[in-house]
Each structure stands twice: as C-alpha cells, then as structure tokens.
Amino acid sequence: VAAITVGFAGADLANLVNEAALVATRRNGDSVTLPDFTQAIERIVAGIEKKHRLLSEQERRTVAYHEMGHALAALALPGSDRVQKVSIVPRGMGALGYTLQRPTEDRHLMRRQELLDRLTVLLAGRAAELLVFGELSTGAADDIAKATALARDMVVHYGMDDVLGPVSYADVQRRYFGMPDGIGPPGATGFGADTAQRIDAAVLELVQEALDRARAILGCHRAVLDRCADALLARETLDADEIAALTGDLAVSSGTPAERRDRRPVTA
Ligand code: ZN
C-alpha cells in the first residue's frame, strides 16, 4: 500500500482506508485486501467507473491512442512517474479514459529537465491523436490546462526562461491587486507590456516544444503504439506488467547515450 500512496498526507490515507473498506463491504468481503486498496485509489484519482457510458468505435480508438500516448511517453522518459494502469473505461465526470501514474518516491525538488519531461508526457495524448488521426479533438483539454499551468510556473515562478532570467514575475500583479494600472510604491510598478508578451511567448514555446517532442518519441515507437492501442481496445484496461510485456524496454532507444546517463534509473 505504501508503494501506491507516495505523496499521500495523513488525511489522504484516512480517506483511502475508508474507500477501501467501502469497496470490501460492497463485495461482502471479510477483510480489506490489496485489490480493494487498488480499486479505492482509482476511485479517488480518476472517479467512479461509468461502464454504461457508450462511446462510438471511433471515439474508443481515439481514447485508446490518446491514453497509450501518455503511457509510452512516460515509459520512454525514465524520470517520469511509474505507469500503473491504462484504461479506456470512462470514469468520473468527464474522463473517457485515464493513465494512472504514481510517483515512486516523495519528491521535493524537480530539475528543469524533469519538468520538461512531465510537459512532454502531458502533451503525449494529443501528440498520439495527431500522429495517428491527423486531427485535433477535445479530449486533450484537461492535459492542455495542466501543461499551460506548469509551463507558466516554469517561466514566472522558477526563473527558467533564458530571456526573462532568474526573476519572479509571479507576485507583481497580486501585490498591487485592486490598484489602477502602473500605480504602486515608487520603483515597483510591475512589468511592462513587452514583458507580458515575452511571458506568453515563453509559455507557448515550452508547450509547443513538448508537443513536438512527444510526437517525435511516439513516431519512433509507432509499431509499439499500434500494438498497445489494439490490446487496450480489446481488453479495456492494461496494468504495468501487461504494458511492459507489450512494449519491452522503450527507454533504451530514446535519447542519446549521454542523455540516458543523466537520467535517473527506472525504479521497479
Ligand atoms: Zn490525456
């Protein structure tokens, strides 16, 4: 249980135990077992299964490629959180499928390259759709929102843009909230229009580059992507072992030898 709850706070664990007990009760179990905990995690992370929500065959194919895109990109970038499960059973309010990734350890510090990898995995669903169908769909809306927020944090909070430099642009607007434009203490009047423009451009560059990189990774592994999407369409859900059996070791063929040396080893 500890391995699947990395990063959980006490209240999250209490909630998980409660959910797992409910799952066990529903199947009339005598005790709470590990599969109950796994199911409880999925309910908490992705929402309740909605098996009756019927998708057309084309929609199922799109969702299958989208989710496998996330999973394969995560496997090809070994610093990524471990892929535990990929599913095309609709869940929760709007999710038509999901890729369950859990970190293998508590993280308190992220390097720039790890954030770029995370952006790439987030955009890999759309990248797979573009690569296979050559079309955009609404399925990537949530991924795009998360990627945009992360890219913006990199630029305005973490000082990771070369042009804008190691300067925080995050608090400027908040500090003078409610004041007319340009009015604040002397010498601290926020940033100008050209800086705002550069922030927008930097965010767009980060997200666009991540999408291009995801497309390149999936293009390299197109045969594996097809094989995994077919398996997912047939079985609806693939766990970590099943995915590993279908993909082999993707990480070996991605990046240059020097890049691979720099990356953290895959855990488990
Ligand atoms: Zn997605």
Image (cartoon, rainbow, N blue to C red):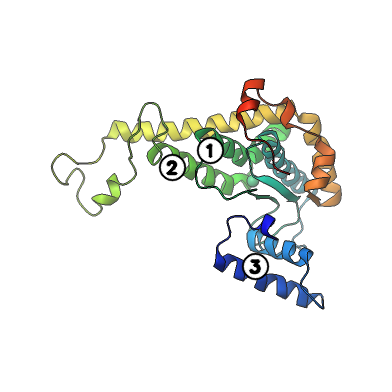
Nearer the N terminus, badge 2 or badge 3?
Answer: 3
Q: The C terminus is located in which quarter?
A: top right
Q: Is mark 3 within 8 Å of ligand 1?
A: no
Q: Is mark 2 within 8 Å of ligand 1?
A: no
Nearer the N terminus, badge 3 or badge 1?
Answer: 3
Q: CA distance from mark 2 to mark 3?
A: 30 Å
Does the rendering let one see residue 136?
A: no
Residue found at x 44% / y 38%: 154
Placement of 190 over or under 9, stated as above or below: above
Q: Position of residue 15 (x, y in %)?
A: 61, 70
The three-letter code of the residue at mark 2 reads Asp
Check residue 153 in the rendering and tell me which mark sits there, or answer none. 2
Placement of 205 over or under 187, stated as above or below: above
The three-letter code of the residue at mark 3 reads Leu
Among the 4 quarters of the image, the one containing residue 167: top left
| Helix, strand or loop for disc 1 | helix
Check residue 115 in the rendering and tell me which mark sits there, or answer none. 1
Residue found at x 72% / y 57%: 90
Q: The N terminus is located in which quarter?
A: bottom right
Q: Is residue 113 left or right of residue 79?
A: left
Residue found at x 74% / y 49%: 86
Q: CA distance from mark 2 to mark 1?
A: 10 Å
- Residue neighbourhood size for the residue with mark 3, other residues' Cα within 10 Å, grouped as few (<14), some (14–19), many (≥20): many
Q: CA distance from mark 3 to mark 1?
A: 28 Å
| Closer to the camera in the image, 89 or 38 | 38
Does the rendering let one see residue 121?
A: yes
Q: Which residue is mark 3?
A: 16
The three-letter code of the residue at mark 1 reads Leu
Q: Is residue 198 left or right of residue 78?
A: left
- Residue neighbourhood size for the residue with mark 2, other residues' Cα within 10 Å, grouped as few (<14), some (14–19), many (≥20): some
